Image (cartoon, grey):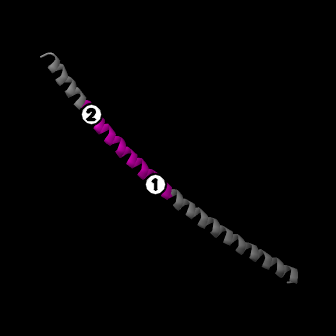
Amino acid sequence: MNKSSVQAVDEAYRKQKEAEKQLQSLKYQAEQNRKKAEKEVQKLKKRIRLQSEKINEIKFFCGIGYIVALVLSACLIKLCFL
């Protein structure tokens, strides 16, 4: 083997190692992005759940208010016709 062949092999080996490092780095970044996205999804699910609970509470109290208004209206109508 002449010197240029040894250098070519060394260069190829160095490039391979560099490519492996880049691959590992990209895999790490992808995993970090996946974890970040997972956290965001969990935050959004929690936010949606809390908003749904608030909406259900509002619906409940509006329903009660509607019933109270009907009862009071009925009472007022009875009082007017007495």
For the residue pair 10 and 5, the one nearer the viewer reads as 10
State the image quarter where residue 55 is shown. Answer: top left
**Residue 54 painted magenta:** yes
Q: Give the range drawn in magenta.
A: 38-67
Image quadrant where one finds the N terminus = bottom right
Q: Is residue 4 above or below residue 28?
A: below
What is the secondary structure assignment of the residue under circle 1?
helix
Horizontal and vertical percent for residue 25? Answer: 64, 68
Horizontal and vertical percent for residue 26? Answer: 64, 65
Task: Give the residue displayed 33% in from the left and 39% down from the top.
Answer: 58
| Main SS of residues in magenta | helix
Disc 1 or 2, which lies upstream in sequence? 1
Image quadrant where one finds the C terminus = top left
For the residue pair 47 and 7, the one nearer the viewer reads as 47
Horizontal and vertical percent for residue 43? Answer: 46, 54
**Residue 53 painted magenta:** yes
What's the residue type where badge 1 is placed?
Lys
User: Which residue matches tag 1?
Assistant: 43
Relative placement, left or right, of 68 versus 44 is: left
Mark 2 packing: few (<14 Cα in 10 Å), some, or many (20+)? few
Q: In this view, does 57 lie above or below 75?
A: below
